[in-house]
Amino acid sequence: MSSGSEKICAITDAATIRGLSADALVTCARCGAKAHDPANVCDPVQFPDAGAFGD
Ligand SMILES: [Zn+2]
């Protein structure tokens, strides 16, 4: 039970959460957690303006 993609929603370690939510691209519709990788939240919703920061 230690593969690559843990759900940030279930993580309680602050340092791990900070690492996973750095440069966040998605938020969790259920609990509001932010993550860079959609695989790390239980119900990922991409930020509507994510594409606007292109360049
Ligand atoms: Zn969640």
Image (cartoon, rainbow, N blue to C red):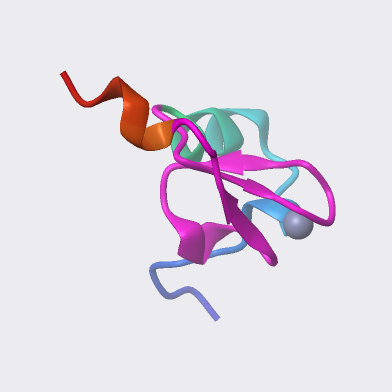
Q: Which residue lies furthest to the bottom in this view?
A: 1
Q: 21 or 19: nearer the eye?
A: 21
| Residue displayed at 59% across by 37% down | 17
Residue 30, percent from left and from top? 84, 56
Front residue of this view, candidates 16 and 43: 43
Of residues 44 and 1, which is closer to you in this image?
44
**Ligand 1 quadrant in view:** bottom right
The stretch drawn in magenta includes residue 24: yes
| The quadrant where residue 51 appears | top left
Q: How many labels does the image show?
A: 0
Residue 22 covered by magenta stretch: no
> Residue at horizontal 83%, vertical 49%?
31
Please state, as top left, top right, bottom left or bottom right, where the C terminus lies in the image.
top left
What span is in magenta? 23-49
Asked if residue 34 is positioned above or below residue 52 in the image, the reply reads: below
Q: Tell me: 42 left or right of 21.
A: right
Tell me if 11 is positioned left or right of 54 in this view: right
Residue at (43% x, 28% y) in the render: 22
12 relative position to 30: left or right? left
Please tell me whether residue 48 is drawn above or below residue 29 in the rendered image: above
Residue 16, x across and y down, in percent: 54, 38
Rendering quarter of residue 12: top right
Q: Where is residue 3 in the image (x, y as percent from the top left)?
A: 42, 75
| Residue extending farthest right | 30
Q: Name the image quarter holding the N terminus.
A: bottom right
In the image, taking residue 15 as reference, residue 10 lies left or right, namely: right
Question: In the displayed structure, would residue 6 be above or below residue 33?
Answer: below
Which residue: 47% across, 31% down?
49
Query: Considering depth in this image, is 32 or 11 the residue closer to the camera?
Result: 32
- Vertical position of residue 30 compared to residue 26: above or below: below
Residue 48: x and y, percent? Answer: 53, 39
